[in-house]
């Protein structure tokens, strides 16, 4: 005998700052939201040791501690937080269908997608080890550059984001080595000129990182000229990776509009997608800012949009 799927007012997919902020607002609006945490509860902030730029934490907070705070606040307003992974969706009808762990079918009048994005890494063993230790490997100059004031750091990447982050770091640190794998940038001409006109950025073309040196913190990197095969050590205390992010949006291909990088598209100044009743928030729809505070802001917007959409449909 088949069980009738439960019908929710608001289903939130994800468990980062966007998801929990959406949950807090949706719960306070009496939408009785259900959050499906996904494969990595807490999102990218679970890999972040120190968060010093989120308002309201004058002494800073670790990423995991902040996510626990946000989760507790959502629970205080009786958000139903469930472990599980959304594995399939069907957005064909007015009631949206979602399957969790390939077996449990849930129906929802509104869905807020806050599945986030993950940074791409080089995949070197010491890079990942030091990243997990919080020992000087980062994918966010805006988040962590403050800790390297007066230091010498390395930046890996050749696109607009890498160029922008290198020039941002250059205002804080003594020197930035910018490692570009090819013999030219992928960045726009304007961003390349900005890098070239910053005196404390040294661009090393045709260079790649082969190893990261250090026990608990970065003490240097081994780089190789991929044309000549020459290796040498750079004396740096921080390594910043800017080779792109991958939004967790594969599940929604064919249902929602995406850009060529996979980020979900939405109505300007709104979080609504082309599917009525489906909204997006956080890094899965943002390749520009990618900050915890901006994700939280769009989570708030998505919940407000969902509440107003339901009211317009006469659902209370």
Image: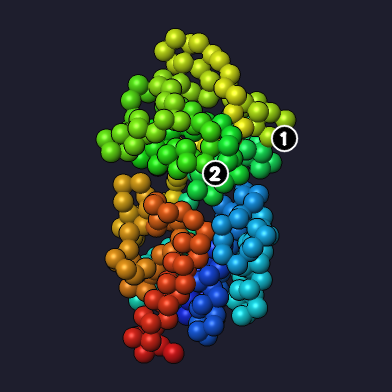
**From the viewer's perspective, is residue 126 above or below residue 19?**
above
Q: Position of residue 48 (x, y in %)?
A: 62, 50
Q: Residue at x 46, y 30 (%)?
A: 200
Q: Is residue 65 visible?
A: yes
Quarter location, residue 194: top left
Q: Secondary structure at mark 1?
A: loop
Q: Position of residue 160 (x, y in %)?
A: 36, 40
In this view, the residue in front, 9 or 79, is: 79
Going from N to C along the chain, the mark reached first, 1 or 2, is 2
The alpha-carbon separation of the residues under discs 1 and 2 comes to: 18 Å
Q: Quadrant of the N terminus?
A: bottom right
Q: Is residue 254 visible?
A: no
Residue 90 lies left or right of residue 257; in this view the side is right
User: On the image, numbered disc 1 is attached to which residue?
Assistant: 216
Q: Residue at x 56, y 31 (%)?
A: 152
Q: Position of residue 90 (x, y in %)?
A: 39, 65
Q: Secondary structure at mark 2?
A: helix
User: On the image, numbered disc 2 is attached to which residue?
Assistant: 145
Quarter location, residue 265: bottom left
Q: Nearer the viewer, mark 1 or mark 2?
A: 2
**From the viewer's perspective, is residue 191 above or below residue 32?**
above
Q: Are marks 1 and 2 in contact (CB under 8 Å)?
A: no
Q: Position of residue 189 (x, y in %)?
A: 27, 35
In this view, the residue in front, 230 or 195, is: 195
């Amino acid at each position: 005998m088949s069980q009738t799927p439960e019908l929710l007012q608001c289903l939130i997919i994800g468990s980062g700052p966007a998801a929990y902020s959406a949950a807090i607002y949706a719960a306070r609006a009496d939408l009785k939201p259900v959050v499906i945490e996904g494969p990595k509860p807490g999102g990218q902030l679970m890999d972040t040791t120190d968060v010093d730029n989120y308002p309201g934490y004058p002494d800073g907070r670790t990423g995991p501690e902040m996510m626990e705070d946000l989760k507790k606040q959502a629970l205080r307003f009786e958000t139903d937080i469930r472990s599980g992974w959304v594995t399939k969706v069907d957005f064909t009808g007015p009631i949206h269908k979602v399957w969790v762990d390939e077996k449990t079918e849930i129906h929802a009048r509104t869905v807020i997608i806050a599945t986030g994005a993950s940074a791409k890494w080089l995949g070197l063993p010491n890079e990942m080890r030091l990243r997990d230790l919080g020992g000087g490997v980062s994918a966010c100059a805006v988040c962590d550059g403050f800790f390297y004031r007066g230091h010498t750091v390395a930046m890996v990447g050749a696109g607009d984001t890498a160029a922008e982050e290198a020039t941002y770091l250059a205002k804080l640190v003594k020197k930035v080595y910018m490692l570009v794998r090819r013999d030219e940038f992928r960045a726009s001409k304007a961003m390349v000129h900005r890098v070239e006109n910053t005196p404390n950025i040294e661009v090393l073309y045709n260079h790649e990182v082969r190893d990261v040196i250090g026990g608990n913190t970065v003490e240097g990197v081994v780089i190789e000229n991929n044309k000549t095969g020459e290796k040498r050590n750079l004396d740096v205390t921080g390594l910043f990776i800017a080779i792109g992010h991958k939004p967790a949006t594969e599940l929604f291909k064919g249902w929602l509009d995406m850009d060529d990088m996979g980020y979900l598209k939405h109505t300007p100044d709104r979080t609504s997608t082309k599917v009525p009743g489906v909204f997006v928030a956080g890094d899965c729809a943002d390749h520009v800012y990618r900050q915890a505070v901006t994700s939280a802001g769009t989570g708030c917007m998505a919940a407000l949009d969902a509440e107003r959409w339901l009211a317009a449909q006469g659902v209370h």
